[in-house]
Structures are given as structure tokens and as C-alpha cells.
Amino acid sequence: MAIVASLPDVNLFSSLPSSPPPSDSPSRSFRPPPPIPIPKYSPSRRNRNPRTEPKPRQSNPALKLPHRRTRYYKPVKEGVISSDGERTILIGESGVSYQLPGAPFEFQFSYSETPKAKPVGIREPAFMPFAPPTMPRPWTGKAPLKKAKKKVPLFDSFDPPPEGKAGVKYVEMPGPFPFGRYPKEGMMMTREEVLGEPLKKWEKGMLVKPHMHDNRQVNLGEDGFTHNMLELIHSHWKRRRVCKVRCKGVPTVDMDNVCRVLEEKTGGEIIHRVGGVVYLFRGRNYNYRTRPQYPLMLWKPAAPVYPKLIQEVPEGLTKDEAHEFRVKGKSLKPICKLSKNGVYVSLVKDVRDAFELSPLVKVDCPGLEPSDYKKIGAKLKELVPCVLLSFDDEQILMWRGRDWKSRFLDNPLTPIPSETNIADDADKTIEEQTVSDQNTVISSPKMISLWKRAVESSKAVILEELDLTPDVLLEKVEEFEGTSQAAEHTFTALVLPGNDGAEDYVDDEDRPEEYSDIDDDFDDECSDDDESFEPVGQEGSLPVDKIVRKLREKLK
């Protein structure tokens, strides 16, 4: 280092040359081999053959159908939109329906949940959801499987198996029949012939009572009564005479429509109904062999496009009035809260009663699917009727409309509403909407119905004079008290049989002893007119009737 430091003009920290000096000798270009030799692999199979452009596949038209995620829309009008011989697809009052040759009626996916509004478009090409008469399939490269040589015996109750064979289900025979009568046989019988004679009250109790706490039932959900449920109900009728149908969700808003459709399409008869549970009787002369057989739907058709329920400017309102109603509806309290998969039998009545006190009504639907509460709003629009304003925040906001009329105008106990402006505040009390009259009595619709029932049953009276002294009022109360007690005890007497063998008020044939202990679980609609109790003795022959005559003479 001392020698280097003694050299003149030597910079120890000078930069390296920018480019290496030219190599004069060929020995400097030699590079040593890498420590690990590079392996030589055989050429890949993909590179062996030269690249050729793939030939376009000739796809079958059956494989070009649009699926659920495709954005397909086609406007339609009323009439036939597709036909293949006698198999046609129609657009009519019942929405999209399918007409097959020899069918007793036009088939639909849902018979009970079809809106009354006509569809304006479809979301998929018009295809029949049923199996075609001939089904050509595209070649997939595999031949169909050969038929199995082993024959599996299929035991059914129509062909009884050997004695002691386990796992055989029982087929319910036709009935019930009175003693000495037999079922009618025939391939083509009408609904009245299949039902037979009307059931009596004890027969209905005998049929319904075993099914009340049984889980063997047909569940009817948001799609309502669908086409494939026809075959499902007949499979229930094969084993039992009564089919239990449990309805939940949207269809329970209009249970009368569900019951009507069940009876029309299945041919049975509803013998009992409690809330959303319906008991469907198949008929006395029902035979599973001669039942009507319908083709099954292989898939669920896409729902068509219907007109919008919520309009920016509803009919009967201006744009400013509609906006004002929607703003007021945000602070309006809902009359009820609908739970998911609930039973909404009394919803229409509750909305009608609420319209008696307020022009705006809101129903809260927390947790429900948007399609569910929109279907509920469409049903309320037709049944109440009303005008839909909004579905915001999972709530249905309705307006009663300009043509609304009170149901209690003829009742003297109800207030007579005045002609108020439609744009008034929805939270105003009923006192601000009534005519100022001293004879006007303010009451709720429920109290009005109770008062009306009490007046009709002679348990209450309407006083035409209001300015009465306490003595005169007490005198009228005492007179009415005596009259009401006498009228309450003047029913027809019931004479029980004594030791001398007097006739009973009900024949033994109409009500046998084994069914006399049936619980009173049935509505008044289940009772027959021919089984009403006949009074024994003449009216007015009791001692209490003489007291009534004397009181009436005094009142005159």
C-alpha cells in the first residue's frame, strides 16, 4: 500500500470504466459450463401435432334454450302465443295457461295465485312444461341402457300380496255408506255422482277428528294451489277419505278463493275449515282407479311480467297529493305486523275497519320477501279495494280512494263523516272529520258491531230522547230490564225422554251413540238444515210466556 500511495496521480476511489476493453484474444469469450446440466425433456404431446383451427360444433336446437340468468323479454298480447298442433299456450284472464288435447280444463302453474291483471310480457320462450308426446334427444355419445332382466315385483293393494307380506300399504275403500247401500261404479261420473249424498254432522266428525292432530297433510305455500298438487291430493285420497290441506303465507289473505279452487279442480268437498287448515273430502263413490289423471309439470315456468302495482301518480290523485301522502305515511303507525309464513285470514277485515277512521293505512311486513308483500298488496287492492302508494321499508301503504263509502252510514250509532279534503292530515282524529251534532255518538267499528248485536238480541235499546231526568231514565231502565229478562227465557223448551219412552228430539239414525261424544270443534256452517232441533209443544204455552204478554200490554 505504501508503494501505491507513492505513485503520482493515482486515485484509489476512481469509478470503473463504462465499457470493458475490447478482447483481442478468443480465449476470453469462453464461458464455463453451469454446475448442473440442463435436462432435455421430450417434446410435449401438444406440440407434436400441428395446430389446427377447431371445427364449429353443430349444436342441437334443444341445447340452445335460454336459462334463468338470460335477460329474455318478449311483449305479448291476449290470445295464442305459441301452438304445436293441438297443444297451445294462451294469454287470457287467468294469465298464462296451457291447453292440451282431451284436457278437462286449461292447465296453469298456480290456480289460486294468478293476478287478475293480464300479463304484458314473458321472461322465457313459450314452451310447454309438460313432457312432449315424442321426446327426441340430441346424441350424447352413449346408447340407452338395456332393460334389466330381473323383474322386481311391485305389490299394490289392488293386487293383494301373499299373506304375511310386510310393507304393504292399505287402500281406503269407497264410503261411508248407510246400511244396505253400495258404491256406484262407472268410468265417467260427474262430481255430484262421485260425492254422493251430503254428509251428516256426525259423519263429518267421524272423518275429520282423526286428522286434526295428524301431520299427514298437503302444505300450500306462497305459490298457492299448483298443478302438481292435483296428483298429490289424489295420492292422499288413495289411503284416506279426507285430505288435510294446511295453508300459510300469501294464499291465506283470500281463503275463500283457495277453497273454491280446491273444490273446482279436485272435485272434492270441503267439510271443515279452521283458519288456514282445510279438510277436503273425496266423495262417497270415489275410486282411485277411475280418478282423473293429469300430466305433471316437469319444471316451474318463469312468471310473466305484469303491470306495475305502484304508479308515480295513482288514479284519483295529483302528483303533489301523492307525494304528500307518501311523506305522511312515513310517520303513520302500522295497524298490524305480518310475520313470515303466517295466517292472514283477518287482514282484509282489519284494513276495511281501519279505513273507517283514517284515509291512509299502513301494514308492516318485517322479514317477508319482496315478492310476498307485493302479492299481499295486490290482493288487498282487489279485495278491500284500495289504492297502493308505496312498498318502502317493507311496509304496505294504502289509500282508501275517492269512491270509498263507509259501511256504517245506515247505523244510527256511527258518526256521519263530512266531505273533507283528501289532502288532509291522516292523523286527524275522527272528531275533526265529523259533523258537529249533539246526537252523534263516536265509537269504534268493533263497538258498533257489538252494539248492533246487542240491539238485535234485545239486550240493549236505543233511546231517541237524550234530555231525560234521572227518575225517567231509571224507570225506562227498569222496564227494559224486565222485558229483556223475559225475552231471554222465552226460547223453545227441550223435553227429554222419560220412563214412558217418549220420542227424543234427534232420531237415533241421525246420531248414533258411538259418535255422541264428538267434541264440538266444528263451525255452524257444517251443520245440516235437516238436522235442526224441532221444538216440542206449541209456542206460548209456557208460564213465562204469560208474563211476557202482561209486560207487553203494560208497555202499550
Image (cartoon, rainbow, N blue to C red):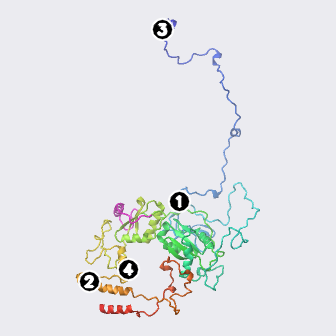
Quickly name the residue at label 2.
Answer: 474
Of the numbered discs 2 and 4, the one sitting upstream in the chain is 4
Residue occupying image coordinates x 66% and y 50%: 56
Where is 131 relative to 280, above or below?
Answer: above
The span picked out in magenta is 311-338
Of the numbered discs 4 and 1, the one sitting upstream in the chain is 1
Q: Which tag is nearer the camera, tag 1 or tag 3?
A: 3
Mark 4 and mark 3: span between their CA atoms? Answer: 128 Å
**Which sits in the foreground, 420 or 48?**
420
Q: Is residue 17 left or right of residue 455?
A: right
| Secondary element type, mark 4 | helix
**Which sits in the foreground, 157 or 481?**
481
Quickly name the residue at label 4.
Answer: 453
One can see residue 401 in this view: no
Q: Which tag is nearer the camera, tag 3 or tag 2?
A: 2
Quickly name the residue at label 3.
Answer: 9
Residue 457 image position (x, y, % from top left): 38, 83
Amino acid type for the residue under numbered disc 4 = Arg
Q: Is residue 6 left or right of residue 359?
A: right
Of the numbered discs 4 and 3, the one sitting upstream in the chain is 3
